[in-house]
Image (spheres, helix red, strand yellow):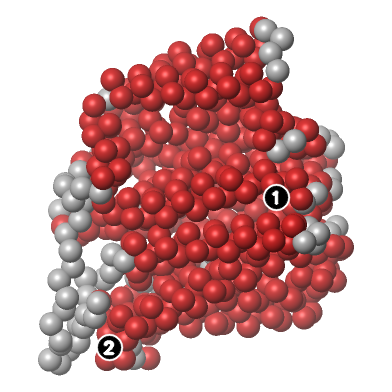
Amino acid sequence: MTRSDTDTQPAPPTVRKRTSFAGDVLKLASGATLAQVLSVLVSPIIARFYAPDAFGTAAVFNSIVAIISVVACLRYELAIMLPKRDKDAANLLAVSLLSVLVFTGLSVLLVLFAQGPIVRLLKAPDLAPYLWLIPLAVLANGGFLAFNYWNSRTKHFGRLSIARVSRSVMISGFQLAMGIIGQAHTGGLIGSRVLSPTIVTVTLGWRTWRDDWRIFAQSVRWSRMLEWAKRHRKFPLLTSWSALLNTASWQLPSLLLSFFFSSSVVGYYALGNRMVRLPMSLIGGAISQVFFQRASAAQNADGNLASIVLPLFRRLVAFGLFPALLLTVIAQDVFMVIFGPRWSEAGVYTQILSPWMFFVFISSPLSTLFSVLERQKSALLLNTLLFVTRLVSLGTGGILGNARLALVLFAATGIFIYGGSSIWILRTSGVPKAQIFNVLSRYLGFSVLVISPVAAIKFSLPASALVTVIAAGIACVVYFILLSREEQNLIRWIRQIAIAKSKRW
């Protein structure tokens, strides 16, 4: 599909198909679902191939890459969604890609001149042979961010869905293949996380150029790039620092657990964190991306955000609260059954992190409103607070030599900050406080009612881990039956996603 928007004799743009929020979410969520299902299916096998210390070293590598990649575009990728004209957004895409090249060069210098200090600081000697892959990973991840938001703007959600599935298939397939041939070591885990994003980013970039090259060729100019870079300077000056602090705070557990404890502890955390985020991110990422586009459009149109924010909040709570509370009770049993006894400690970490993850799940889509409402200073303050509290929490547990305590403090401060910020952004969007607490209390009651028998089986009866997991599965069925009877509007929304109807939400 080719569109053009130029100053002189623009070619007639292709009309964009009108779609519903649920339909757009379906396109992204279907890909995310398939990718996550694949990850779930192969995770038990991969966990039996690779040792916890291999997971830990790979997690440290991924943390370094994530911290650099998140600011590789200087957050100009978010600004791509905002201009009314495509030609202006194209110049912001060019600014983003240029920034990625600069950060890739800086990461080359980092590896060349700071390799020794990095390895010594993190106490991860097994990481040294793989540091040279950091620049390639930064280039791939940064480029994907830029193309991702351009394709969101042009509503190529199906294309993005395919990209997500492809990346997941390649990562899981590479890791599984390395294990089958007897090469289950750190290199297999790290290599898959570099090779797969590189292939996906190149493919996505080529398809973007194939469809929209006329816009880029006719609109992108150095003067316009500079003009729009200045127009949205809040993104590099404020939002980039906010994103850097937020990502660094997310990666602090891997880095500090490596510093204070061992690669095995990092491995337990990495697998536990991955699995606790899995059910939450199944549709959360897709909702977040589509919601950002719809919220931007609503703000540009009439500024009425509450009408789309409150239904989103209610649905996020309905889907997120129950699994978070259930994992708090039975996660250790789940890990012992699925991944084997040596991963029992990872299950304990998951129990600690599950309540915190619920508030992250709620906050993630809502946090896009900071950009929509141009509250970048508030986002920067929030992420500064997150970084400081996480540093203190993990540092306290590390100094005391107790990894579980470190994660308890980490989760507790996260619950307080994410919960508070979510309420604040809901209120700022015009959602009444009474409705916020009514939603939370309603689904909390449902969840506690259904989970109580599972907790009784686990703690009051001499039940095995397998029996507890089976009881939890039954509880999930019961919860969604109760939910379907209580919330007909919610179930209609689920059906919209399932059948991809193009109706208004």
The part of the image, by quadrant, that contains residue 127 is bottom right
Q: Position of residue 490 (x, y in %)?
A: 28, 32
Q: Quadrant of the C terminus?
A: top left
Residue at image coords 25%, 42%: 496
Q: Residues within 10 Å of mark 1 (few under 14, many from 20)?
A: many
Look at the picture and state if 97 lies above or below 166: below
Mark 2 — residue?
Answer: 214
Q: Is residue 115 left or right of residue 234?
A: right
Residue 64: mark: none
Residue at image coords 28%, 20%: 485
Q: Position of residue 113 (x, y in %)?
A: 79, 79
Q: Is residue 3 left or right of residue 442?
A: left
Residue 46: mark: 1
Label 2 residue SS: helix
Q: CA distance from mark 2 to mark 1?
A: 45 Å
Label 1 residue SS: helix
Look at the picture and state if 57 lies above or below 482: below
Q: Residues within 10 Å of mark 2 (few under 14, many from 20)?
A: some
Numbered disc in front, either 2 or 1 = 1
In this view, the residue in front, 430 or 278, is 278
Q: Is residue 309 left or right of residue 405?
A: left
The part of the image, by quadrant, that contains residue 176 is bottom right
| Amino acid type assigned to the residue bearing label 2 in the image | Arg
